[in-house]
Image: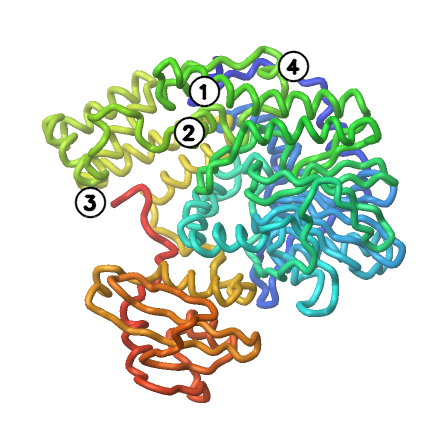
């Protein structure tokens, strides 16, 4: 059984991953530092050089050190003739598929600055090829956010993405973006120093860049498996894989290059079925089946498999083993969780009891550096059964602060609680020591002894974790217990605002309405958006902002005639330019703005 708090490490290393990670190397970015226009460092791969220079530190699980060292390779690599990748310049890879007139860019990283640096590195070795098309494999921002570093909006460059890309890019990165990015600071360990005592990796790559994030909407959607598009003279054959690593995702095959891109559906780690930063629960069964479909459709003609993270795999036998083990891992977790669930076990119980087949346990690429067996099993349980485990004692539990106060009282006060925390920590039961310490911190957030006790336990848990995101969560929590909360690095929702449709803009407005403050307000506004020729009507009623597109009823307390840019400006600043045409009660807009909450991008997590 794989123990997730102190996992085993007994797999022989045949050295093939290191050979693959180095294969095709052409040149590195030297120095490996990227800055924005103001001189601020947004990426520093040189900070991870320690991973390639020495033996594993005792403060890093040896399997995680191995993974981090493989990810720390940085530079331009040839995947196969006409296909290159820049790896190690962001959390994800950027891929360059050479065409007749220029180059097709796949998944342009997180931020414009690193995408531009990667393109410049590619051009320095392969010539000044223009970007002739862009492909987004899925709507996670590490696969589109840097697009404005390689093309300009409205310059006519085709942008290809899977069907429903924009819907899911907005629902994840805008609607829930503030909360996800805040938790993402824990996920990536963005507040802790890089080094053996701190952040070493995320499992998928070293970290994420912190530059300018943008989005250029797709001009062409892929809607069906088998759909072919010729981009700059190159045949792309697409496979739709919705509900896998993202709600909208696609793989593609390049027949003339005999190269299969698996997007983020197969990487050199067990992936997440529910990320610790938050997301919609993914479908492990569908994930397994789509990998199997890719095996059937493409592997007879593929000489190399590459992806949007990590390094490629070459050779048909190794490709089949890699894809089959990835397929089997997701299928096994799904089926065994359902089997054990139907015997009455809960998600947390299944996570403790599930046993992994020896052949999969021995495969480096399905180990839990990013996802884990523990939280993936709980995600499968959640997908089918929800948050409630069926025990009525868990149906109406107190929230954390009230619960903590009661636990401390039951233990006999703060002093007694601290004694018990130290006792369990000394015995090596760090999991329960952390639980008790968290209760004490929530019961008495000004108790410095409690915060230090929890920070110490979290640090020990982090240093023992094979999973990079678990390590980062533990160490980030310890850091924030000892230091003020740092400002969240990426304002993701704001950076993507220009790509919103008008309907999505009103949806993002509605989720900011403070319901209790708006209970007594009733108002209606008619919005005529001139540059996109759309009319919308919003009604505030019973604390909810109801939205009508192309309404039959055009009566309203206030009518506004404006551009989409002016609407987005209103959402960002809370005010409109004087030039906007108004008809009716101007106070209606003031009243609407007065009931909106501003999201808190730096809310506390390990304290109340």
Q: Which residue is mark 2?
A: 384
Contact between marks 1 and 2 (CB within 8 A): the answer is yes
Left or right, residue 409 beside residue 438:
left
Q: Secondary structure at mark 1?
A: helix
**Sequence-earlier tag: 3 or 1:** 1
Rendering quarter of residue 383: top left
Rendering quarter of residue 449: top left
Viewer-proximal residue among 132 and 416: 132
Q: Which residue is mark 4?
A: 12
Mark 4 Cα shell of 10 Å, populated few (<14), some (14-19), many (≥20): few
Q: Which residue is mark 3?
A: 446
The picture places residue 71, in percent across and down from the top left corner, at 64, 36
Left or right, residue 321 beside residue 451:
right
Q: Secondary structure at mark 4?
A: loop
Q: Nearer the viewer, mark 4 or mark 2?
A: 2
Mark 3 Cα shell of 10 Å, populated few (<14), some (14-19), many (≥20): few
Contact between marks 4 and 1 (CB within 8 A): the answer is no
Distance from label 3 to label 4 (Cα)?
A: 48 Å
């Amino acid at each position: 059984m794989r123990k997730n708090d102190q996992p085993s490490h007994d797999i022989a290393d045949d050295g093939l991953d290191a050979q693959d990670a180095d294969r095709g190397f052409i040149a590195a970015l030297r120095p490996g530092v990227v800055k924005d226009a103001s001189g601020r460092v947004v990426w520093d791969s040189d900070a991870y050089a320690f991973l390639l220079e020495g033996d594993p530190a005792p403060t890093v699980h040896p399997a995680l050190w191995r993974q981090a060292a493989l990810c720390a390779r940085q530079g331009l690599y040839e995947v196969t003739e006409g296909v290159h990748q820049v790896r190690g310049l962001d959390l994800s890879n950027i891929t360059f598929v050479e065409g007749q007139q220029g180059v097709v860019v796949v998944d342009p990283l997180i931020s414009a600055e690193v995408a531009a640096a990667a393109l410049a590195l590619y051009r320095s070795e392969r010539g000044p090829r223009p970007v002739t098309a862009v492909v987004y494999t899925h709507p996670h921002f590490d696969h589109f956010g840097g697009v404005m570093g390689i093309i300009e909006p409205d310059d006519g460059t085709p942008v290809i993405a899977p069907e429903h890309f924009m819907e899911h890019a907005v629902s994840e990165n805008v609607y829930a973006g503030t909360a996800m990015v805040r938790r993402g600071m824990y996920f990536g360990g963005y507040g802790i120093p890089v080094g053996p005592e701190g952040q070493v990796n995320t499992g998928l790559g070293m970290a994420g860049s912190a530059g300018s994030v943008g989005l250029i909407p797709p001009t062409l959607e892929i809607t069906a498996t088998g759909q072919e598009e010729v981009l700059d003279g190159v045949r792309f054959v697409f496979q739709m894989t919705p509900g896998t690593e993202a709600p909208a995702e696609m793989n593609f095959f390049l027949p003339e290059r005999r190269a299969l891109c698996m997007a983020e559906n197969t990487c050199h780690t067990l992936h997440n079925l529910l990320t610790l930063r938050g997301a919609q629960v993914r479908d492990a069964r569908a994930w397994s089946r789509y990998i199997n479909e890719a095996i059937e459709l493409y592997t007879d003609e593929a000489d190399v498999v590459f992806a949007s993270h990590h390094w490629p795999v070459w050779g048909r036998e190794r490709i089949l083993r890699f894809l089959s083990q990835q397929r089997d891992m997701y299928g096994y977790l799904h089926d065994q969780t359902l089997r054990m669930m139907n015997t009455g076990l809960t998600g947390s119980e299944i996570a403790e009891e599930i046993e992994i087949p020896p052949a999969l346990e021995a495969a480096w690429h399905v180990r839990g550096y990013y996802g884990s067996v523990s939280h993936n099993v709980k995600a499968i349980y959640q997908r089918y059964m929800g948050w409630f485990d069926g025990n009525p004692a868990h149906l109406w539990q107190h929230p954390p602060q009230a619960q903590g106060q009661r636990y401390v009282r039951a233990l006999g006060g703060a002093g007694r609680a601290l004694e018990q925390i130290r006792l369990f920590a000394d015995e090596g039961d760090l999991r329960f020591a952390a639980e008790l310490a968290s209760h004490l911190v929530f019961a008495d957030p000004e108790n410095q002894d409690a915060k230090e006790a929890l920070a110490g336990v979290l640090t020990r848990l982090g240093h023992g974790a094979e999973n990079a995101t678990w390590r980062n969560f533990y160490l980030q929590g310890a850091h924030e217990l000892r230091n003020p909360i740092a400002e969240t690095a990426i304002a993701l929702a704001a950076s993507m605002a220009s790509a919103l449709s008008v309907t999505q803009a009103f949806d993002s407005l509605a989720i900011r309405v403070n319901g209790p403050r708006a209970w007594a307000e009733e108002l209606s506004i008619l919005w005529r958006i001139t540059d996109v020729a759309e009319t919308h009507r919003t009604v505030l009623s019973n604390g909810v902002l109801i939205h009508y597109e192309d309404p039959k009823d055009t009566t309203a307390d206030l009518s506004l005639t404006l551009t989409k840019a002016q609407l987005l400006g209103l959402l960002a600043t809370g005010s409109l330019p004087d030039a906007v045409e108004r008809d009716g009660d101007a106070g209606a807009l003031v009243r609407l703005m007065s009931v909106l909450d501003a999201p808190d991008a730096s809310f506390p997590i390990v304290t109340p």
